[in-house]
Image (cartoon, rainbow, N blue to C red):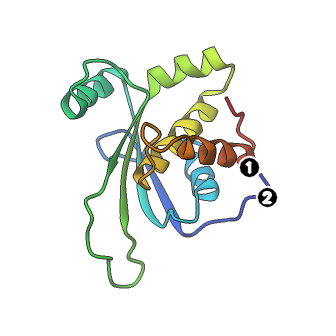
Amino acid sequence: MSRLRPSTRLRVAVTDGRGRHKPAGTLPLWLARVAPRAAVGVVVVALVGDRKMRDLNSRFRATDQITDVLSFPADPAPVPTGPGAARFLGDIVIATGRAARQARAAHLTEQQEWRRLALHGLLHLLGHDHERDDGRMRRLERRLQRRSGLPVD
């Protein structure tokens, strides 16, 4: 982790899905440090239960199942002005139950799985699309995971 640079470019807030602060260990600091240079602004990571994730997936993707992570990019807006103003990049939603099961199956800690999913979600907020980019997002994701000390699958 010592090779990572401190970042003030990306601010990360973690909530419970209702906007209330939720303790998430070192996730916010880790994500800010490992984020690619293009990640400038504010992102919210919402840690929600599986039922809530199923509802979101059904409502926004017309898929009635639980997924591990969803990203909701902010609508393009003018760059904020004023002291301390930062552009809102969007929301990342992580299903904590699904993440816990995946962590156990991959022999990771829940914190490592949250990190893996938050990074994946952030890359989507930045415009990456692993379904259409001939593997570019996956290669970037793996490089950032390795650089941060996160196990690479």
Q: Quadrant of residue 119?
A: top right
Residue at position x 69%, y 19% in the image: 107
Position of residue 52 in the picture relative to residue 146 (left or right): left
Secondary structure beneath label 2: loop
Badge 2: residue crowd in 10 Å (few <14, some 14–19, many ≥20): few
Position of residue 5 in the picture relative to residue 25 (left or right): right
> Which quadrant is the C terminus positioned in?
top right
Secondary structure beneath label 1: helix
Residue at position x 47%, y 49% in the image: 122
* Viewer-nearest residue: 78 or 104: 78
Residues tagged 1 and 2 counted as in contact (Cβ below 8 A): yes
Q: Is residue 130 above or below residue 30?
A: above
Disc 1 and disc 2: Cα gap in Å?
7 Å
The percent coordinates of residue 22 (x first, y second) are: 44, 42
Q: Quadrant of residue 71?
A: top left
Q: Residue furthest front?
A: 134
Residue at position x 37%, y 25% in the image: 49
The percent coordinates of residue 63 (x first, y second) are: 25, 22
Which residue carries the number 1 mark? 147
Q: Do we see residue 87 in this rendering?
A: yes
Which residue carries the number 2 mark? 3
Q: Do we see residue 26 in this rendering?
A: no
For badge 2, the amino acid type reads: Arg
Residue at position x 42%, y 62% in the image: 42
Mark toward the start of the polypeptide (1 vs 2): 2
For badge 1, the amino acid type reads: Arg
The percent coordinates of residue 35 (x first, y second) are: 58, 56
